[in-house]
């Protein structure tokens, strides 16, 4: 029998500012790194215009009404730094600030817990021009100023703060998630240097959140890594991959230091970041309270001989199965590979609800912290059919299985605060524009034509409404 979730369980869904808001350089907002990257993407990345996106900036009241109709008790979104500080300095854009005041007030009026993310890939562009953005340690102080300002502004309305979104994904896909000048693109040590600056920035955010009595958690894109075979060398490769892809980030957030094996491997290969003496003190004094888990899939690895070249995660940008452009390789440590045991989405993302159960169990044992799911979902080419509906039964099946995995883990004592799948409404996919949709609410637009961005409830909207109404038993 299905167990009920606790009465105060946070049911909702997620979005991020640049993927949903639009109004990218209007209403006082400054250009962000994501506006720049997306609007200057090469052919291979396809459409990614942030200027309208899902026009949430103008539809936020309607969107929140629909969230309420689904029964949301929480909503995870991000606050665009460049909407509040268009230049990344201390000059406030009052109109942008007012947008978030209004959004948060609207959520509160509807009894929906606002769960903001302070950084979701969108650094103010002037900071790239000033000192090359995250490549410079100077960014830490600027981010700290922004974080402190926002946390103080909303301290009475926000309990759970998400600090930085998906540092591990930024390391893997650094040119897509972060602006990297061409001259640096083959200097792979800088991936880990950027990440180190983000760790410092995230620790500062935790400090300011704690000062006002809030709870802080980073959002990590977490995919557990399995060994391809039972061979001991493949098991060791999976251990290495988990250390470098997952624990290297988590240990800093929850223990205050870098995972030894992963850090030493990076050092041996001239990839380790430069660290100042007091950096780990800042980490250990500002430990996060919960982990926001972004879970889509699991991964697989096998042993890799010394002598191979380093390689980073590939992309599938076409949505045709098998079109992955490559697999991460760290010689003498591991090489990633597809898992023949699992179904995949059209973009080659493995579908693995049991993997989520493994994540909960593993991480709870290691850190004993509460979790909230802040991303989980299925990217698909949804179609508006002639009956004016979107029949996304594949998404319902995916979400249902992951909710069931959450219930099983909770039954064994794991503490999960909430479930906020990706995404509340259709938004700009980082890899495939509006060809790849995740929403519970359809946004009527195509890559080429923003139309009116009319909102249409998908079948998953009606299904999720019942799940929430029955507190997970339906
Ligand atoms: C996560 C990001 C989100 C979102 C999601 C789906 O890594 O935090 O911003 O984009 O992945 O990715 P995609 O849009 O590439 O399918």
Image (cartoon, helix red, strand yellow):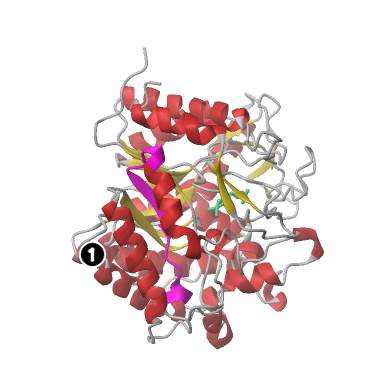
Residue 105 location in percent, x, y? 29, 61
Residue at image mark 1: 155
Which corner quadrant of the image does residue 441 belong to? top right
Residues drawn in magenta: 69-84
Q: In which quadrant is the N terminus drawn?
A: top left
The kind of secondary structure element at disc 1 is: loop
Is 368 displayed left or right of 338 in the figure? left
- Packing grade of label 1 (10 A; few <14, some 14-19, many >=20) is some
Residue 132 location in percent, x, y? 57, 81
Respond yes or no on whether mark 1 lies under 8 Å from ligand 1. Answer: no
Identify the residue at image location x=51%, y=77%.
Answer: 124
Is 243 displayed left or right of 71 in the figure? right
Residue 436 location in percent, x, y? 67, 47
Tell me: residue 168, above or below residue 372. Answer: below
Q: In which quadrant is the C terminus drawn?
A: top left
Residue 135 visible here: yes
Residue 258 visible here: no
Which is nearer the eye, 397 or 440?
440
Which is nearer the eye, 398 or 283?
398
Identify the residue at image location x=60%, y=28%.
Answer: 393
| 464 in the magenta segment | no
Residue 100 location in percent, x, y? 37, 67
| 79 in the magenta segment | yes
Identify the residue at image location x=47%, y=41%.
Answer: 421
């Amino acid at each position: 029998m299905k167990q009920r979730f606790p009465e105060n369980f946070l049911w909702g869904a997620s979005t991020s500012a640049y993927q949903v808001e639009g109004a990218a350089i209007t209403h006082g907002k400054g250009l962000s790194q994501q506006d720049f990257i997306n609007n200057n993407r090469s052919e291979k990345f396809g459409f990614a215009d942030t200027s309208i996106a899902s026009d949430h900036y103008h539809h936020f009241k309607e969107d929140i009404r629909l969230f309420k109709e689904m029964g949301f008790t929480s909503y995870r979104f991000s606050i665009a730094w460049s909407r509040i500080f268009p230049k990344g300095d201390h000059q406030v854009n009052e109109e942008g600030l007012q947008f978030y005041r209004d959004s948060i007030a609207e959520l509160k009026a509807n009894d929906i817990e606002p769960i903001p993310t302070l950084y979701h890939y969108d650094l103010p562009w002037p900071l790239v021009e000033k000192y090359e953005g995250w490549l410079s340690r100077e960014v830490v102080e600027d981010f700290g100023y922004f974080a402190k300002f926002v946390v103080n502004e909303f301290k009475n309305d926000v309990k759970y703060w998400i600090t930085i979104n998906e540092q591990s994904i930024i390391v893997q896909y650094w040119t897509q998630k972060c602006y990297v000048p061409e001259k640096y693109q083959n200097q792979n040590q800088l991936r880990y240097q950027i990440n180190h600056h983000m760790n410092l920035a995230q620790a500062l955010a935790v400090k300011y959140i704690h000062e006002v009595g809030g709870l802080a958690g980073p959002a990590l894109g977490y995919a557990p890594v399995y060994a391809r075979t039972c061979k001991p060398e493949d098991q060791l490769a999976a251990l290495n991959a988990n250390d470098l892809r997952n624990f290297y980030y988590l240990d800093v957030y929850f223990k205050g230091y870098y995972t030894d094996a992963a850090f030493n491997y990076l050092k041996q290969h001239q990839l380790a970041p430069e660290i100042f003496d007091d950096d780990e003190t800042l980490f250990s004094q500002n430990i996060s309270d919960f982990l926001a888990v972004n879970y889509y899939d699991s991964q697989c690895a096998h042993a890799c001989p010394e002598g191979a070249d380093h390689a980073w995660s590939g992309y599938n940008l076409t949505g045709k199965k098998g079109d992955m452009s490559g697999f991460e390789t760290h010689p003498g440590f591991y090489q990633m590979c597809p898992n023949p045991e699992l179904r995949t989405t059209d973009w080659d993302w493995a579908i693995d609800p049991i993997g989520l159960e493994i994540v909960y169990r593993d991480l709870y044992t290691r850190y004993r912290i509460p979790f909230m799911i802040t991303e989980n979902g299925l990217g698909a080419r949804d179609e508006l059919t002639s009956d004016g509906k979107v029949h996304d039964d594949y998404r319902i099946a995916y979400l249902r299985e992951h909710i069931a995995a959450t219930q099983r883990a909770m039954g064994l004592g794991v503490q999960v605060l909430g479930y906020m799948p990706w995404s509340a409404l259709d938004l700009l996919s980082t890899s495939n524009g509006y060809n790849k949709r995740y929403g519970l609410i359809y946004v009527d637009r195509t890559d080429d034509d923003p139309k009116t961005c009319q909102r249409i409830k998908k079948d998953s909207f009606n299904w999720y409404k019942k799940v929430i109404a029955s507190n997970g038993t339906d």
